[in-house]
Image (cartoon, grey):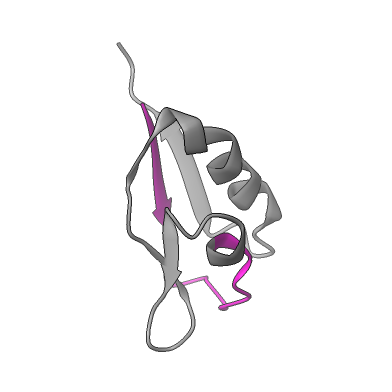
Amino acid sequence: MLRVSIDSSICQGHGRCYVLVPEVFQADEAGQGLVVTAEVPEELEDKALLAEENCPEKAISCSRDLP
């Protein structure tokens, strides 16, 4: 399973994550990215990885659980 997280200390609130995958990310009250689905459903994994690649500050981390 793919898990995502955001390092809020480096997020600048560009919003690419929640525009690309609103099922996984949303904006907090300051406009910074917020993970709402830490365990990403299989059908959204590619989109979550795209959000990770498109984060200008590299604040998003995606990792897989080992079997």
Q: Residue at x 38, y 87 (%)?
A: 29
Q: Position of residue 44 (x, y in %)?
A: 50, 38
Q: Position of residue 46 (x, y in %)?
A: 59, 35
Q: How many marks?
A: 0
- Quadrant of the rendering where the C terminus is positioned: top left
Q: Position of residue 11 (x, y in %)?
A: 52, 71
Q: Residue furthest bottom?
A: 30
Q: Residue at x 43, y 88 (%)?
A: 30
Q: Quadrant of residue 66?
A: top left
Residue 49 appears in the figure: yes
Q: Residue furthest top?
A: 67
Taking the magenta stretch, the answer to whether it contains residue 7 is yes
Bounds of the magenta segment: 1-17
Would you place residue 35 above or below residue 8 in this image?
above
- Quadrant of the rendering where the N terminus is positioned: top left
Would you place residue 7 above or below residue 60 in this image?
below
- Of residues 36 and 60, the one nearer the viewer is 36
Seen in the image, is 36 located left or right of residue 12?
A: left
Taking the magenta stretch, the answer to whether it contains residue 49 is no
Q: Residue at x 44, y 34 (%)?
A: 63
Seen in the image, is 39 located left or right of residue 60?
A: left
Residue 7 appears in the figure: no
